[in-house]
Image: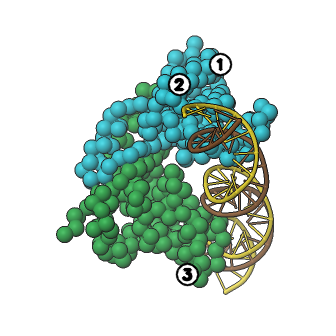
Chain colours: A cyan, B green, C yellow, D brown
Amino acid sequence: MKTNNPAFPSADHDHKHCVSLALKNAEAYCLQQGLRLTKLRHQVLELIWANHQPVGAYELLEQLTQEGRKAAPPTVYRALDFLMENGLVHRISSRNAYVGCSHAGHDHTAQFLICETCGQVAELDDARIGSVITKDADQLGFTVAQWTLEISGICDQCKRGTADE
Amino acid sequence: MKTNNPAFPSADHDHKHCVSLALKNAEAYCLQQGLRLTKLRHQVLELIWANHQPVGAYELLEQLTQEGRKAAPPTVYRALDFLMENGLVHRISSRNAYVGCSHAGHDHTAQFLICETCGQVAELDDARIGSVITKDADQLGFTVAQWTLEISGICDQCKRGTADE
DNA sequence: CTGCATTATGTTACAATATAACATAACAAT
DNA sequence: ATTGTTATGTTATATTGTAACATAATGCAG
């Protein structure tokens, strides 16, 4: 039996459901905020979620092209910019890659566990980290705008060998 | 009078002393560890410290060239690799830039405050953050190898206007 | 100190990631 | 419909980073 791990979904979880849920959330959020989640942006967001692990911009570009859209690098980067500005996607800068964000709304903070073996990413959301950061920064008179925490290591499934993969 | 801020050194601090101290530490560390801090590596490390804020690889390349060394990109990247492996330099991935590390020894963790205005970087070293990370990761069965925390915002000096700059 | 293995650097070419700048198209509101 | 605004298409190029192989320096066994 698989462990039910909310952070690193097991390989047999319902991908499609997972993606469509994320998209619905995004649609609702954009509607509510008066943001234009155009076809292109929707498509890019869907691809990001479908990959379900960090995807590079040029990988997205290729996938877009395969889906029949005429696209060049700016096409992808602009969509990514929009999605990031509005908190629907995060950039993993240590990998030059992008992942979908589950808690939309532009939050500007992110905490990731990145598995070096399988490449999967889990988004943490531990308030303690933010509070420590804020306190430290305050003491130095530093005003925090945003931050990224990227934690690299090995996930549970990969440690147990191939059984779960 | 300037604030004596250990994290963000004021503009009038003794640059040269600062650099030479860092270099001496690095030399001592490499000697002790049997690491070969060659002329090139030493030169690159010195340039990084001399800049005293994150420097890009190609910027370093240019500076190396100006100092009369024949250098191509791999020259710089290899030196950077060595310096990073041995904890003498950190990479700021959100900026594709490199900074000197004050606590040598390969530690593999880093916490940075990055001022969006002046570009200066302060390295934090708050043990609480590491401990929260470890606990969170443990609960998910994730084994942490290394992590990077990059905090973007505005430093004290820049908030006060140009007086301190 | 000589030859050999190892490590570091030089050199050329190129891969991967990202943006500038300007043209066209879609949209939203009069 | 007209117009201002926002989004996308298109071409070219900037920026960052590596692969692959040649040469040079270094450390060490004999």
- Which is more foreground, mark 2 or mark 1? 2
Q: Please report, as a chain letter, where disc 2 is located.
A: A
Q: Are marks 2 and 1 on the same chain?
A: yes
In the rendered image, residue A47, in percent from the top left (x then y), is placed at: 67, 31
Seen at 56% across and 36% down, the residue is A83
Assign a secondary structure to mark 3: loop
Assign a secondary structure to mark 1: helix
In the rendered image, residue A155, in percent from the top left (x then y), is placed at: 54, 31
Q: Which residue is mark 2?
A: A31
- Which is more foreground, mark 3 or mark 2? 2
Q: Which residue is mark 1?
A: A16
* Residue A128 shows in this picture: yes
* Residue A48 shows in this picture: no
- Which is more foreground, mark 1 or mark 3? 1
Q: Please report, as a chain letter, where disc 3 is located.
A: B
Q: Of all residues shown, which one is farthest toward the left? A: B1
Marked residue nearer the N-terminal end (2 or 1): 1
Q: Please report, as a chain letter, where disc 1 is located.
A: A
Q: Which mark is residue A141?
A: none
Question: Would you say B14 lies left or right of B45 here?
Answer: left
The span from disc 1 to disc 3 (Cα, nearest Å) is: 57 Å
Q: Which residue is mark 3?
A: B67
Q: Quadrant of residue A154?
A: top right
